[in-house]
Amino acid sequence: MERRHIATVALEDYFHVGAFNRLIQRGQWNRFETRLERNTDRVLDLLDRHGVKATFFVLGWVADKHPELVRKVAERGHELASKGYYHRSVRQMTREEFSDDLLRSKAAIEAAAGVGVVGFRMAHEWFQPTDLWALDVLAECGFKYDSSIALIGRDFAHEPWRRFLHKCRTHSGDVWEFPISSVEWMGLNLPFAGGNWMRQMPESVTRRCFAQWTQRHPAPAVLYFHAWELDPEQPRLNAPSIAARMRHYRNLGKMEGRLDRLLSQYRFTTAADYLKLPRAPSRVWRPAETKNTAPTMLCLNRGGKTPVSIVVPCFNEELALPYLGNTLTGVRERLAEQYDLQFVLVDDGSSDATWASMQRLFGQARDVKLVRHDVNRGVAAAILTGVRAADAEIVCSIDCDCTYDPLELERMIPMLGDDAAMVTASPYHPLGGVRNVPGWRLFLSRGASWLYRRTLRSKLATYTSCFRVYRKSAVAGLQVDEPGFLGVAEILGRVDLAGGTIVEFPAVLDSRILGRSKMKTVRTILGHLRLLAKLRWLRWKAAPQTPRTSTPASSPQQPELSAPAEEPVGVR
């Protein structure tokens, strides 16, 4: 009988991976431009060229979002198995949570494809010896095999037989284990048969390890790779470390060729077929949902709702615009019942394809205004251009990269009471927070806030956030000397010096996910010192006024709107 190894594929997108778990929250997944369909087609075509049937480990979230894609994999003759619902480690869950996650993912995959699921692989981190209780839960939930063990280093050193296919006996039944294949080197075990290991090692090493395994061991080798590993053009996310960037991006352009040559040399099959497990049909079925791959910009009906304009300054944000579009779709869904939304996107003289992408993604939406600066004038100037082009009296500004969650506008907008000129997000508020922001930047930002508190009347925790809600009549006529990042602080400073009430909203600031920050650190520090001196001089010149600084109210009142909108200039 011809010797066969096991081929497995992780059906997940580039933003699901463990290298970015700290950077990306699960609630943000819907905001990314998916590349799963094109990558899955590339994998299927690669396997078809060699007549290989593989086991696809699928996230339940993917099955719910892309049921037609999961069904396509099954229709092409491949096996579907579970990778859990979300991209989590077993060590992040209790026994009950793990069981619920297993059953939820199993139901989602079976509903999408109409076939039974009997296999499982942990999405994040391999099983350690202390995690083997999970095998009992797998048997309890009806799974027949697992592929979540990888002998790395000295893991399972006291049980060397776990390097090979073996049967695990649990209280709830037997579970076969397909461990990730590894070689012994200087007393350590090193995986060689796929994923990051296959991309980092020279191809000659991988091929030599496969040849040695085939000659020495009767058990099948387990090849594994991810759909995104065949996509060298995927968006580059701001990985939290050099190691994470190398782990995710190194040799992506070589992976398909390496797999192509390996698949041509050896024969592979699915885990279920190797064990001769029947592929039972699922008892659950649901029709595929209508697919929508582009950001959807729906137009809200005017029906007595409060008009609100949302301004988004954009400078060289071609990469971030699909993410922005999906995020704004979520904002619409969240705020649709209360507000009649308008979006004003301002291209601040971008030198890349930002303007063309804005027109392609948003140009057909009747409730979106696209405004363009002929030259780059800075983020504050772009915000003020958007405010002046807005049709509503309540105007919000958000970052194009969504480092603050725009869904928080649901709570921020009602805080703009009749006596308030501005609501500003504050990550340095005692109830706010920051994630994945370097410590040195936090130190500089907090230092700047300390200086602004000693210069302005409003005693806030944060003065530099772009995430705000404005009363248009309070800011549209401002003359701001600093057009860039400094201008954001100057807008607040001038509102403060004019006696306007500024409400602070505790928010969470995330690091930028896509693209690079345009802020120049040293120049910005010197600029803040210059601006502080200017504001102190203006305050000294101005007549004494009583500050009106507010804190978040427990029951904010909805403001009444009356001021007319100005006619926008340069709107397309």
Image (cartoon, rainbow, N blue to C red):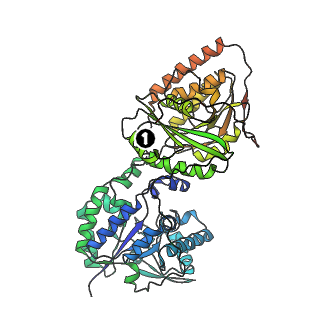
Percent across and percent down for residue 109 are 50, 73
The one of 290 and 313 positioned closer to us in this rendering: 290
In the displayed orientation, state which residue is furthest to the top.
Answer: 541
User: At 33% across and 53% down in the image, what residue appears?
Assistant: 233
SS assignment at label 1? loop
For the view shown, which residue lies furthest in the bottom direction?
A: 1
Residue 110: percent from the left, percent from the top? 50, 76
Task: Please identify the quarter of the rendering in which residue 274 is found.
Answer: bottom left
- The N terminus - image quarter: bottom left
Q: Is residue 489 above or below residue 54?
A: above
Name the kind of residue labelled 1 in the image.
Glu
10 Å crowding of disc 1: few (<14), some (14-19), many (20+): many
The quadrant holding residue 212 is bottom left
Q: Is residue 444 visible?
A: no
Question: Is residue 18 something that shows in the picture?
Answer: yes
Residue 329: image x %, image y %?
Answer: 54, 51
Q: Residue at x 52, y 20 (%)?
A: 481
Decide if residue 70 is on the left or right side of residue 42: right
Question: In the rendered image of this protein, does residue 146 appear above or below residue 552?
Answer: below
* Picture coordinates of residue 383, whole percent (x, y): 53, 32
Using residue 344 as the reference point, say whether residue 235 is left or right of it: left
Query: Which of 229 and 359 lies nearest the eye of the viewer?
Result: 359
- Rendered residue at 58%/29% (across/down): 566
Left or right of residue 230: residue 244: right
Q: How many marks?
A: 1
Residue nearest the viewer, comparing 18 with 192: 18
Q: Which residue is mark 1?
A: 317
Q: Is residue 339 above or below residue 134?
A: above
